[in-house]
Amino acid sequence: MLKQLEIQGFKSFSDKTVLNFPEGITAVVGPNGSGKSNVVDAIRWVFGEQSSKNIRINSAEDVIFSGTPQKQASSSSQVSLLFDNRFKTFPLDFEEVEIRRKVYRDGASEYFLNKKQVRLKDLVQLLASAKLGLKGMSIINQGAADVFLRANSVERREMIEEMVGLKELRLKKEEAERKIKDSKLNLAQAETILNEIGPNLRSLKRQVERWRTRQEKEAELLVLEKDFFIKKIAELLKETNLSQDGKDEEKIKELENEINREQSSLKNFNQGATGHSGDRQKIQAKLESLQKQRFEILRTLGNLEGQLELLGSLPETELNFSLNDAKQKLEQVLETLESVLSSEEISSIKEKIAALTKSLKSFLTGSESRSHKESESKKQSLLDKKTELAQALDELEEKIVQEKQALADEEKEKNQSFASLIASLENKRKEMRVLEEKVLVSKVERERFKLRQEDLSLRLEEAGLSWDVFVKDNQARLEQAKSFGEDLGPFEKKILRLKNELSLIGEVDQETLKEYETISARFEFLSSQKSDLESALEDLEELSKSLEEKIVSGFEEALKKIDKEFQKYFGIIFDGGRAALKVEKVVDDQTQAVNFGIEISINLPRKKIKSLEMLSGGERSLTAVALLFAVINYARPPFLF
């Protein structure tokens, strides 16, 4: 029940005014213009009245005390109601409930519940739970006793709903319907946006699927190419055998060194052969000269023989001349022999010639003092010497023959050595040519290997790999692949197939992926929101339906009892007659919305009046009182004004 009303700065109440309402009936009395109606207006205003007409003002600022010559105008206006809540008229865990409204001259309005600021919406719902509100009959303005009769059927229904406590459910239903409307609007907007971005998202999704397919194909291609590269590199390493190439090159270098040595030897040999050839020519010339000297010696010896025969008859001077001439010729022969014979051989011949010369000199010396007999003896000695000279000449001839043979043997040996050296050089050159051809082939293979390596390196780079790193990381597999050969044909076919598939898939712009992620996230968010809205809409519709069922059920029950009470009080007041409340269907002409209202039918005793319009003013007021008593008897409000 209402315990207290506090007014300050509201309309004519400049000062703080407190009205206490004890149990029972309280009457507010005073002369005209004292502010009695302002008390009722204050209650309506604190309940959240927004209509200036219902509280008799022209503008919102008029609720604030405007001042008088004696009092200054107020800067704000506030009204508070204090209720006893021991019987839980309000569904709050407080024994007292205070409702307060405050407004400022700038138009700002505040609502408080137990000194805590709340929304008007929350306040209206709280009042509805206590069967209070602005549409019910708990507050009846002056001259508005028949407000229920003057209202249309829908307004009557709303008034009864408020009086019997169904307004709270109605507010919840209206709130649910507003949320349903908002949810449907949001749902429609979400569906519109989803329909707009859906085709684009599907297109982007196809591109992303292409990208994912491409990623899968590229991953598969990477694995295949890795295996292919391992086997291909192993095959190349196995085919080229680079270590053997190094050995062949070393062997070629060794052969080149040997050939250089052989060529140097050959050069030296050629130089020696050239020298020996000159010596040979010189020796040959000397031999020819020696032959000539031999012939000269022979001729000289022949002359000596002839002279010896005439020795006895020749004079001594002639004999000396002949001997001197023979000595000179022997010395010339000796000089010739010195160039071709050894020192020992020349010494031997010199000794013989010296001995012969000495004998001749002795002979000549002795011939001066000896007799003819002695001359004959010396002649015989000369003959002996001649024989010795002939023998020396024979020895000389034999030595010449030996020297010729030695020279021929040496020339033959030189020729054989030269031929052997030429043959060895040719063999080494032939071997080097074979090795050079082998190295050339190896170099060609190496160039082919480099080209294939470069090609593989490019393919590795395309696959995001490095040759050195790849070979290092896969050394074990390379060794294994070198040991076990495998046909690369299937790998190449698969790689070609995957590359063709990738070519057909084409490139996917990275911006497309980002756009897809953005739009997909938005689509998922909107889809989630749409799902939530649909779920919330379903719950709201279910709630609205449930509230409507409760309202209809509660209203039918309340109307049935109120109608019974209305007939009772109507009969008492009018001493007979009949009155009834009936539900009628109301269709809005513009929206075609179906609603329900209350129609009042009355039948006064001793009068043929069947409509409210035919009632007099007093009859209308009494009918309204009968209806008010009927409602109060069914659902007692916290207060009536």
Image: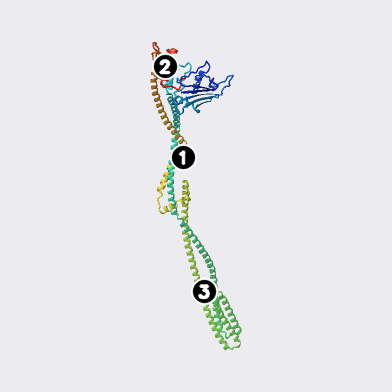
- Amino acid of disc 2: Ala
**Eye-nearest disc, 1 or 2:** 2
The answer, for residue 315, to whether it is visible in the render is no
Q: Please tell me how crowded label 2 is: few (under 14), some (14-19), or many (20+) other residues with Cα within 10 Å.
A: many
Return the residue at label 3. 403
| Residue toward you, 539 or 184 | 539
Q: Secondary structure at mark 3?
A: helix
Give coordinates of residue 453: x percent, y percent.
47, 50
Q: Secondary structure at mark 1?
A: loop
Give coordinates of residue 415: x percent, y percent.
49, 68
Q: Is residue 232 left or right of residue 57?
A: left
Q: Which mark is residue 464?
A: none
Give coordinates of residue 197: x percent, y percent.
45, 33
Cα distance between the residues tagged 1 and 2: 83 Å
The answer, for residue 82, to whether it is visible in the render is yes
Cα distance between the residues tagged 3 and 1: 101 Å
Return the residue at label 2. 626
Q: Please tell me how crowded label 3 is: few (under 14), some (14-19), or many (20+) other residues with Cα within 10 Å.
A: some
Return the residue at label 1. 508
| Residue toward you, 339 or 173 | 173
Mark 2 or 3 closer to N-term?
3
**Eye-nearest disc, 3 or 1:** 1
Q: Please tell me how crowded label 1 is: few (under 14), some (14-19), or many (20+) other residues with Cα within 10 Å.
A: some
Mark 1 or 2 closer to N-term?
1
- Amino acid of disc 1: Val
Residue at the top extreme, as displayed: 606
Mark 3 or 1 closer to N-term?
3
